C-alpha cells in the first residue's frame, strides 16, 4: 500500500485530490497539510511513501519543503502538482529533489499512475515540463544574463519604462524590447514583474 500525503493550501484542492484516490486499492491518503512546513511534519510523522506537493503556498513553499524532505528523509518521493509550468518554476523544483512535476489539469488516472511511478522511484514529468528541461539542456547559457541584460533588468526593477531605459543606456527602445524578451526566455518568465521577482530570487538584483 502506497502511503500518500497531500500538501496544498486550498482545502477544496486537497478535498478533490483526496476523492481522486478514495477508490484506489493500492494508494491510501494518510494525511494532509496546508503549507510546506506542516507538510514536512506530516510526511515524516506518517511515514509517507509519496508526497503530492503544491508549489506556491504561504509560508514554506513547495521547493523549500521538497529540499528539506529530500535532506531529512531521502526515501520519501516528492511529486509536484501545480498550475505553474514556467522554466523558473520547474527547474528549482527538480533541483530541490522532486521526482516528478505534474500540472493540475492532469486527469485522475494520470495522477494515480504518477503516484505509483513515483513510489517505484521513477521520474514523472508533464509534457510541457519535459520541453522546458530539454530546452534548458540545449541552451548552455540558459539563465545567464549578459551585462547589458542585467543593466536592463536593473532599470526595469527601478520602475523605468522601456523609453526611459533606452534613454539611460543610449540605445533604441526596440533594443530594450529585444533584451527584455531574452531576459524572459532565460529566466523562464512571461512579464516584467515576474522577471524582476525572479531576478531578486536568483540574486541578480540587489
Image (tube, grey):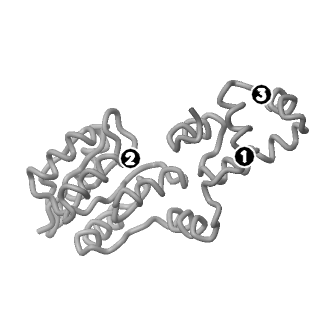
Please tell me which residue lies in front, 154 or 86.
Answer: 154
Indicate the quadrant containing the C terminus: top left, top right, bottom left or bottom right. top right
**Element under disc 1:** helix
* Discs 1/3, front: 1
Q: Which mark is residue 147?
A: 1
Left-right relation of 13 to 164: left
Point out residue 122 in the picture as x, y percentages from the top left corner. Answer: 32, 74
- Within-10-Å neighbours for mark 3: few <14, some 14–19, many 20+: some
Q: CA distance from mark 1 to mark 3?
A: 19 Å
Query: Horizontal and vertical percent for residue 6?
Result: 23, 50
The residue where tag 3 is placed is 161
Mark 2 lies on residue: 55
Residue drawn at the location 51% of the way across and 54% of the way down: 85
Q: Left of 149 or right of it: where is 85?
A: left
Q: Earlier in the sequence, mark 2 or mark 1?
A: 2
Structural crowding at the residue carrying mark 1, measured as other residues with C-alpha within 10 Å and reported as few (<14), some (14–19) or many (≥20)? few
Above/below status of 100 relative to 31: below
Q: Residues within 10 Å of mark 2 (few under 14, many from 20)?
A: many
The mark nearer the N terminus, 1 or 3, is 1
Amino acid at each position: 500500500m502506497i502511503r500518500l500525503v497531500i500538501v496544498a493550501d486550498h482545502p477544496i484542492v486537497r478535498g478533490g485530490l483526496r476523492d481522486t484516490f478514495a477508490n484506489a486499492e493500492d494508494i491510501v491518503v494518510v494525511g494532509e497539510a496546508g503549507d510546506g512546513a506542516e507538510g514536512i511534519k506530516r510526511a515524516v510523522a506518517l511515514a509517507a511513501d509519496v508526497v503530492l506537493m503544491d508549489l506556491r503556498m504561504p509560508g514554506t513553499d513547495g521547493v523549500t519543503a521538497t529540499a528539506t524532505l529530500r535532506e531529512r528523509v531521502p526515501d520519501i518521493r516528492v511529486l509536484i502538482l501545480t498550475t505553474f509550468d514556467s522554466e523558473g518554476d520547474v527547474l528549482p523544483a527538480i533541483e530541490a529533489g522532486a521526482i516528478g512535476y505534474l500540472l493540475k489539469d492532469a486527469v485522475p488516472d494520470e495522477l494515480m499512475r504518477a503516484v505509483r511511478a513515483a513510489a517505484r522511484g521513477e521520474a514523472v514529468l508533464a509534457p510541457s515540463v519535459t520541453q522546458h528541461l530539454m530546452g534548458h539542456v540545449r541552451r548552455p547559457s540558459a539563465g545567464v544574463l549578459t551585462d547589458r541584460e542585467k543593466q536592463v533588468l536593473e532599470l526595469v526593477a527601478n520602475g523605468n519604462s522601456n523609453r526611459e531605459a533606452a534613454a539611460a543606456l543610449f540605445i533604441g527602445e526596440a533594443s530594450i524590447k529585444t533584451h527584455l524578451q531574452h531576459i524572459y526566455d532565460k529566466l523562464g518568465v512571461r512579464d516584467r514583474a515576474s522577471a524582476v521577482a525572479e531576478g531578486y530570487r536568483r540574486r541578480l538584483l540587489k
